[in-house]
Image (tube, rainbow, N blue to C red):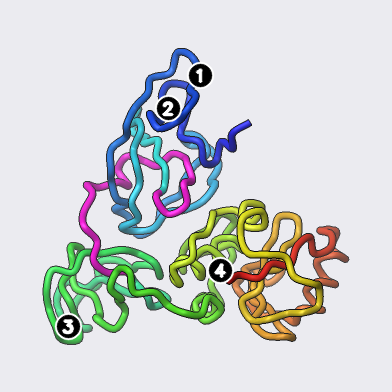
């Protein structure tokens, strides 16, 4: 049975690339678009529950628009869902991404000018010009120090995760404004050029290789049923968690004990990337 989270098919249309399509559905190629809001919920159904989030400039393929909703598939991880049609704009050629934890868009190349919106780490923009402290983008002016060229990756996923320390916990969240456990791991790995699926069960199944318990190295991933954390050093981990309701650092042993005692079971996998 295909995983509905990454299978671009609904009750009316299906991606033309799918090998098998249920009878009665229309095959569609889809059209490219970009997210045009700082952050938007990716919903399971129109007005349904949030599965994940997408952030500004992320590319999607649109398979259907209907009654103000767009049925899309995210390019970064193949996740499928519904966005308000108003949250999408025309595809553009992104040149840079926000490599700071977050940033503001300004109306002029001056930090005292009015800001128009905030962008999360990972947002994508098109730089149009400028070589000083600010550069002009398709949205407005951004601090040059907060941007990196598209294709320039960070090297330490844990250091990326640490940019999110204190970020409020948000189930299904994918931004500096609110994030969950799998969203934090995905943001950290994507910033380092490592492909990563969106949910913790997918991450457990697809990322890294299993290593013996107790041999904790920086960047290892620890999984529980419905949860994932990243090892920071031999004694601590970093994770977005509902205990702190934030991204926090916690001793590994204490986290393992606490999570099991609260009824969520033992560690189910210990994975090492590389």
Q: Is residue 91 left or right of residue 159?
A: left
Q: Are marks 4 and 1 in contact (CB under 8 Å)?
A: no
Q: Please provide percent x and percent y for residue 26.
A: 38, 20
Q: Nearer the viewer, mark 4 or mark 2?
A: 2
| Figure check: 10 above or below 137 | above
> Left or right: 90 with respect to 29?
left
Q: Is residue 170 magenta?
A: no
- Kindly give the residue lying farthest to the top in the view shown: 24
Q: Residues within 10 Å of mark 3 (few under 14, many from 20)?
A: some
Give the mark, 3 or 4, whose residue is nearer the N terminus.
3
User: Label 1 near label 2: C-beta < 8 Å?
Assistant: yes
- In terms of secondary structure, where does tag 1 sit? loop
In this figure, which residue is indicated by the disc labeled 1?
Answer: 22
Q: Nearer the viewer, residue 93 or 263?
A: 93
Residues 228 and 37: in front is 228
Report helix, strand or loop for mark 2: strand
**Which residue carries the number 2 mark?**
14
Figure check: 154 above or below 69 = below
Pointer 2 local density, CA inside 10 Å: few below 14, some 14–19, many at least 20? many
Estimate the x, y position of residue 156 in percent, counting from the top left.
51, 80
Query: Residue at 52% of width from left, 41% of height from top?
Result: 6
Residue assigned mark 3: 110
Q: Examine the structure image and report whether residue 89 is included in the region drawn in magenta.
A: yes
Label 4 to label 2: alpha-carbon separation: 36 Å
Tell me whether the residue at label 3 lies in contact with that at label 2, contact meaning CB atoms closer than 8 angstroms: no
Q: Earlier in the sequence, mark 4 or mark 1?
A: 1
Q: How far is disc 3 from disc 2 in space, using C-alphas? A: 47 Å
Return the disc, 3 or 2, that comes first in the chain's sequence. Answer: 2
| Residue receiving disc 4 | 168
Mark 4 crowdedness (10 Å alpha carbons): few <14, some 14-19, many ≥20: many
For the residues bearing labels 1 and 3, Cβ distance under 8 angstroms: no
């Amino acid at each position: 049975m295909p995983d509905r989270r990454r299978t671009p098919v609904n009750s009316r249309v299906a991606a033309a690339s799918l090998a098998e399509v249920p009878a009665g559905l229309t095959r569609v190629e889809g059209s490219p678009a970009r997210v045009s809001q700082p952050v938007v919920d990716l919903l399971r159904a129109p007005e349904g529950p949030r599965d994940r989030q997408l952030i500004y400039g992320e590319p999607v393929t649109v398979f259907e628009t209907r009654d103000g909703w767009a049925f899309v598939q995210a390019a970064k991880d193949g996740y499928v869902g519904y966005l308000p049609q108003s949250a999408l704009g025309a595809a553009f050629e992104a040149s840079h991404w926000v490599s700071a934890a977050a940033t503001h868009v300004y109306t002029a190349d001056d930090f005292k000018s009015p800001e128009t919106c905030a962008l999360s780490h990972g947002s994508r923009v098109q730089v149009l010009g400028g070589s000083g402290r600010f550069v002009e983008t398709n949205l407005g002016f951004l601090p040059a120090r907060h941007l990196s060229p598209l294709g320039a990756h960070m090297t330490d996923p844990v250091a990326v995760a640490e940019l999110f320390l204190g970020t409020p916990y948000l189930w299904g969240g994918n931004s500096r404004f609110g994030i969950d456990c799998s969203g934090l791991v995905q943001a950290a790995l994507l910033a380092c050029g490592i492909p990563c699926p969106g949910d913790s069960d997918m991450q457990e199944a697809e990322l890294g290789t299993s290593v013996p318990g107790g041999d904790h190295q920086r960047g290892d991933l620890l999984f529980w049923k419905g949860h994932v954390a990243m090892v920071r050093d031999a004694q601590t981990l970093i994770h977005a968690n509902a205990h702190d309701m934030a991204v926090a650092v916690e001793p590994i042993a204490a986290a393992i004990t606490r999570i099991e005692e609260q009824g969520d079971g033992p560690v189910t996998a210990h994975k090492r990337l590389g």
